[in-house]
């Protein structure tokens, strides 16, 4: 490839990368193009500008897409099924009611962040919001508290899990790209995520709830208040079903640490059931019984639930695949090596670099998923040539960066605005501020943890 305006080969590659990313951002953010189509176009443009052969470029795009979705697509499908069973059985409402009873009305906002954190483990953020909105309305009405006082802690719990805690697709993408250990990432995610969610949730929720007083849209409030709370599943079985995939993954990681040589038959078994695909498959099938047949649902009901819930995930899966294609072109064109060389020369903190890259793409595109997939491709080669860096913390930093500053180009922004009956300015002061607190506080805790691990 010819150098551009006398620039070095690496500098030229970085210029073409900037062009491709600007193209990507403009089409998604300004012109509202489909992110999947835009990611594929950007990958092809970058490859051609970088001088890749046409057939090599096509193999890079298809290989990157397929390689990324190999595990992630299964994780999304099974996780969505598990979340759907929780929704239909009333398990989420059982968890909320139990925690409210235990915590009492004065501390109910602390219960809400726990609800968001627990319910968010097996479901997408959007699914979790839809699932928990009736509980937010119900609790706000019962306690007489501000809607944001109750809602912000739940949203903080959901969003923290979405950005930081596997098996959510966002951290899973980075785990795959960086070669991080799943169990260690889960452990660090909990150490970072719990205090982060507390600060952005109950603490900020109490502050903003006193300053922005809103009521839920009457149509939604009427619809949700009419729901029956009879015959809910038990708290213990619901909690066990939701946490089963995480428990199995932790079991596999602990067995691997205790027996690194893998000499024990139990270690092989634990690592097998602890693989994210197997753990989620076991948990999804278990939920058919614990939250399905045990609640009186028929085989036809469960079949319908698990089929219907997959349709909304199609676009998410394709966007992740498109991000994987873009990531692979970054690597195969030599851009990854050029970025790695630049970062290495500047001696930048890799954790801070990962957060910053993800944050910039998130602000520009409005999509945490696009931010994670694109940032993973940019950060992976930098990580490969860096020494003494904790890979699992880089995963968390990338996830934290992908949460920052949700605004008008983010579908989640409009979802929260409509459900809570807020104006754009009120949504910026509450939801956008909460997401930014989550991201920045999360980064601070990650940097503190990096001193010790």
Image: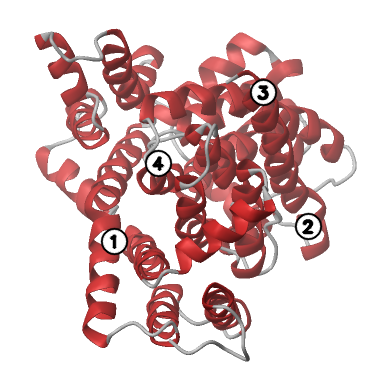
To which residue does mark 2 refer? 428
**Residue located at (80% from left, 34% from top):** 204
Disc 3 element: helix
**Residue located at (55% from left, 45% from top):** 399
Disc 1 element: helix
What whole-number distance in Å separates the C-alpha atoms at marks 3 and 2? 34 Å
Front: mark 3 or 2: 3
Q: Which mark is residue 175?
A: 4
Q: How many residues crowd around disc 4 within 10 Å: few (fewer than 14), some, or many (20 or more)?
A: many
**Residue located at (69% from left, 40% from top):** 438
In the image, residue 279 sits, relative to residue 331, either above or below, namely above
**Residue located at (67% from left, 57% from top):** 406
Query: In this image, 107 relative to 368: left or right?
Result: right
Q: Quadrant of residue 159?
A: top right
What whole-number distance in Å separates the C-alpha atoms at marks 2 and 4? 31 Å
The mark nearer the N terminus, 1 or 4, is 4
To which residue does mark 1 refer? 311
What whole-number distance in Å separates the C-alpha atoms at marks 1 and 3? 44 Å
Residue 204 is at least partly visible in this image: yes
Q: Are marks 4 and 3 in contact (CB under 8 Å)?
A: no
């Amino acid at each position: 490839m010819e150098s551009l305006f006398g620039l070095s080969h690496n500098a030229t590659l970085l210029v073409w990368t900037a062009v491709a990313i600007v193209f990507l951002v403009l089409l998604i953010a300004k012109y509202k193009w489909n992110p999947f189509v835009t990611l594929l176009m950007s990958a092809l443009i970058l490859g051609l500008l970088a001088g890749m052969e046409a057939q090599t470029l096509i193999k890079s795009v298809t290989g990157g897409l397929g390689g990324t979705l190999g595990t992630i697509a299964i994780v999304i499908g099974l996780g969505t099924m598990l979340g759907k069973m929780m929704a239909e059985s009333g398990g989420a409402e059982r968890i909320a009611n139990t925690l409210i009873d235990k915590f009492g009305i004065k501390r109910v906002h602390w219960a809400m962040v726990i609800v968001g954190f627990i319910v968010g483990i097996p479901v997408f953020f959007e699914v979790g919001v839809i699932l928990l909105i009736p509980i937010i309305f119900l609790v706000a009405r019962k306690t007489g508290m501000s809607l944001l006082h109750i809602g912000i802690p739940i949203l903080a719990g959901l969003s923290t899990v979405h950005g930081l805690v596997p098996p959510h697709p966002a951290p899973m993408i980075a785990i795959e790209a960086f070669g991080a250990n799943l169990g260690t990432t889960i452990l660090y995610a909990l150490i970072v995520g719990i205090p982060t969610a507390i600060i952005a949730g109950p603490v900020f929720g109490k502050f903003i709830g006193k300053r922005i007083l809103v009521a839920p849209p009457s149509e939604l409030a009427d619809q949700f208040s009419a729901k029956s709370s009879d015959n809910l599943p038990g708290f213990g079985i619901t909690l066990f079903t939701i946490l089963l995939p995480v428990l199995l993954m932790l079991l596999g990681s602990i067995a691997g640490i205790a027996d690194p040589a893998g000499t024990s038959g139990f270690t092989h078994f634990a690592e097998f059931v602890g693989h994210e695909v197997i753990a989620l498959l076991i948990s999804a099938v278990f939920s058919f019984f614990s939250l399905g047949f045990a609640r009186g649902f028929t085989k036809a009901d469960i079949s319908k639930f698990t089929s219907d819930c997959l349709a909304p995930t199609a676009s998410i899966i394709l966007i992740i695949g498109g991000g994987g294609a873009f990531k692979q072109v970054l690597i195969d064109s030599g851009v990854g090596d050029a970025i790695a060389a630049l970062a290495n020369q500047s001696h930048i903190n890799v954790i801070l670099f990962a957060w910053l890259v993800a944050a910039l793409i998130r602000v520009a595109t409005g999509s945490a998923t696009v931010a994670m997939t694109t940032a993973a491709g940019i950060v992976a080669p930098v990580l490969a040539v860096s020494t003494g860096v904790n890979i699992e913390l880089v995963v968390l930093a990338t996830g934290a960066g992908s949460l920052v500053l949700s605004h008008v180009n983010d579908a989640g922004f409009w979802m929260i605005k409509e459900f809570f009956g807020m104006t754009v300015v009120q949504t910026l002061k509450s939801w956008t501020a909460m997401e930014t607190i989550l991201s920045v506080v999360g980064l601070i805790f990650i940097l503190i943890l990096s001193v010790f691990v």
